[in-house]
Image: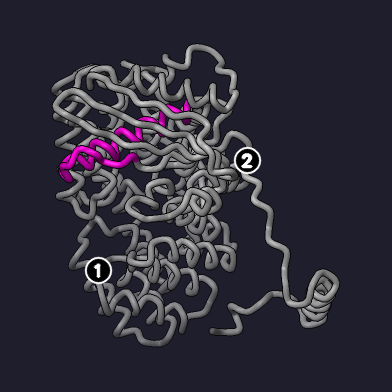
């Protein structure tokens, strides 16, 4: 541990704090501390993964998918605060008692149950539990045809609201069933595609998800949710996996067509507007992106995914307070998911709150310890703090196990600052061999940090020519600060038309 990571308190202040703590312990009871009272927000609920009772492991996608659909349905009830999918699913397969789960997720109620499927019929058992007392507030068993799943989601959401004495405003069924399907085969394909999407590890996985969403759409051409989901998958493929201008453009074009189709079919569908916002962010068309994020937020104010992406976009556009507020809200709704915490950490880093960013990255790392990319993110944060030895240490940790773009990118900059120019150039050469022109923004950052603005701007112009989906980061990126006053950089910013 370095001094840079120690307490920010001055010695005199620290002494006062410690003295106060000691006095508290003596007055209350020697060496004991009062437990913090459990006080979750009113009407807060977690939907745990329903147990697959079909006796067939291949049906796991169905019970998981149906749980997610019920979770999304409950999120449409205005007064409910529903924990997002990833945090709720983190307890799957674990023998954790309800009280512990409730405290970790900070909720007052938990919905759990089981699913038994036989062909196109399904039996669902549900129990709503008061986390503080452990008592059942409500339970019921439903036997339905798979084509009635939309109606079933409305029934369960309504029953939960009534059990919690929530007054439903307006036609809740219209909100819950919006964009869905009554075609059993299309619903099944959609759930399989979603399982593939959330578990993807490679370009092949994401393409498989796209293909399976296509299957769902083929079975029900009016399935707006499937169009929105396929749009988001196409956009993700363009940014994460496509390596040529043609492939990037084709995926973004497909993403835009799908997003517009979703909105045409269901104008009030938050996911459709989110999908189109993501397309505009990557195209880029930031003014239209902002409008679509605003619409997605209005329609899905408690959707952690919408909050995360719109919050991050706001920070990239320079609307710092609004962006951070949305990101913190996303973390509160999805406390055990590393992804919202990653974006919050990145936002803090963009805003040069480096100590806070470092703490947030390390917290996120505890939630996903097997994801080695945290080391590179922590390394770059140390780099921006001027702690090049720690930057090298963390980036080399990743390099020893898995040499990927972010590792070589970090080490190319860090080795240069440590006077190891040959090693820095070797890292850049490896990165270019792997990424080709698709790494143009990474090369821009490296050359900017090497003090070579001409090369940096040449690569930034290449990224602009390719319409790189990551150009939205240009305005806020602290690694590009050395280029800010360059006329060529300012011309690129004008062309990108960042909003004021």
| Residue positioned 40% across, 87% down in the render | 419
Nearest the viewer among 127 and 281 is 127
Nearest the viewer among 37 and 465 is 37
Q: Quadrant of residue 189?
A: top left
From the top left corner, tell me how far across and down residue 176 is, in percent. Answer: 41, 21
- Is 64 included in the stretch rendered in magenta? yes
Compared across the picture, whether 360 is left or right of 255 comes to right
Give the magenta range.
Answer: 50-76
The extreme top residue here reads 171
Q: Residues within 10 Å of mark 2 (few under 14, many from 20)?
A: few
| Residue positioned 33% across, 66% down in the render | 370
Compared across the picture, whether 7 is left or right of 401 comes to right
Residue 315 appears anywhere in the view: no
Q: Tell me the distance, in whole angstroms, between the alpha carbons under discs 1 and 2.
A: 47 Å
| Residue positioned 18% across, 51% down in the render | 203
Q: Quick check: 4 above or below 154?
A: below
For label 1, the residue is: 431
| Residue positioned 41% across, 19% down in the render | 155
The extreme bottom residue here reads 419
User: Where the C terminus falls, by quadrant?
Assistant: top right
From the top left corner, tell me how far across and down residue 342 is, in percent. Answer: 45, 56
Label 1 sits on a secondary structure element that is helix
Label 2 sits on a secondary structure element that is loop
Of the numbered discs 1 and 2, the one sitting upstream in the chain is 2
User: Where the N terminus falls, by quadrant?
Assistant: bottom right
- Is 186 included in the stretch rendered in magenta? no
For label 2, the residue is: 41
From the top left corner, tell me how far across and down residue 408 is, in percent. Answer: 30, 72
From the top left corner, tell me how far across and down residue 378 is, in percent. Answer: 45, 70
Q: Nearer the viewer, mark 1 or mark 2?
A: 2
């Amino acid at each position: 541990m370095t001094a840079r990571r120690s307490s920010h308190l001055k010695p005199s202040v620290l002494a006062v704090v410690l003295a106060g703590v000691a006095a508290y312990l003596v007055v209350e009871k020697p060496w004991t501390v009062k437990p913090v009272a459990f006080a979750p927000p009113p009407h807060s609920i977690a939907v745990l993964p329903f147990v697959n009772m079909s006796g067939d492991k291949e049906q796991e996608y169905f019970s998981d998918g149906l749980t997610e659909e019920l979770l999304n349905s409950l999120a449409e009830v205005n007064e409910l605060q529903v924990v997002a999918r990833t945090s709720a699913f983190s307890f799957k397969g674990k023998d954790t008692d309800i009280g512990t789960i409730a405290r970790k997720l900070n909720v007052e109620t938990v919905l759990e149950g089981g699913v038994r499927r036989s062909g196109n019929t399904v039996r669902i058992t549900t129990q709503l539990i008061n986390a503080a007392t452990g008592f059942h507030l409500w339970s019921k068993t439903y036997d339905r045809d798979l084509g009635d799943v939309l109606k079933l989601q409305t029934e369960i959401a309504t029953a939960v609201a009534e059990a919690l004495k929530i007054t439903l405003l307006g036609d809740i069924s219209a909100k819950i069933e919006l964009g869905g399907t009554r075609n059993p085969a299309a619903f099944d394909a959609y759930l399989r595609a979603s399982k593939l999407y959330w578990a993807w590890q490679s370009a092949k996985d994401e393409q498989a998800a796209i293909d399976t969403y296509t299957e769902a759409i083929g079975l029900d051409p009016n399935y707006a949710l499937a169009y929105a989901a396929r749009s988001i998958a196409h956009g993700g493929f363009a940014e994460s996996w496509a390596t040529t201008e043609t492939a990037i453009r084709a995926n973004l074009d497909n993403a835009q067509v799908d997003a517009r189709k979703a909105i045409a079919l269901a104008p009030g569908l938050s996911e459709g507007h989110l999908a189109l916002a993501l397309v505009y962010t990557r195209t880029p068309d930031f003014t239209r992106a902002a409008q679509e994020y605003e619409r997605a937020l209005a329609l899905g104010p408690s959707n952690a995914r919408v909050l995360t992406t719109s919050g991050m976009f706001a920070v990239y556009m320079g609307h710092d307070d609004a962006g951070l507020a949305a990101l913190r809200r996303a973390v509160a709704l999805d406390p055990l998911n590393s992804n919202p915490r990653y974006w919050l950490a990145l936002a803090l880093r963009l805003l040069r709150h480096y100590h806070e960013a470092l703490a947030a990255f390390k917290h996120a790392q505890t939630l996903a310890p097997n994801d080695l990319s945290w080391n590179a993110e922590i390394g770059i944060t140390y780099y921006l703090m001027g702690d090049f030895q720690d930057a090298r240490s963390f980036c080399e940790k990743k390099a020893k196990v898995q040499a990927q773009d972010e590792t070589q990118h970090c080490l190319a900059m860090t080795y240069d600052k440590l006077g190891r120019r040959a090693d820095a150039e070797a890292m850049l050469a490896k990165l270019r061999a792997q990424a080709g022109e698709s790494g143009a923004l990474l090369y821009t950052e490296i050359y900017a940090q090497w003090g070579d603005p001409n090369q940096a701007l040449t690569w930034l112009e290449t990224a602009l020519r390719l319409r790189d989906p990551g150009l939205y980061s240009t305005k806020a990126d602290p690694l590009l600060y050395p280029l800010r006053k360059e006329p060529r950089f300012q011309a690129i910013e004008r062309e990108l038309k960042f909003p004021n």
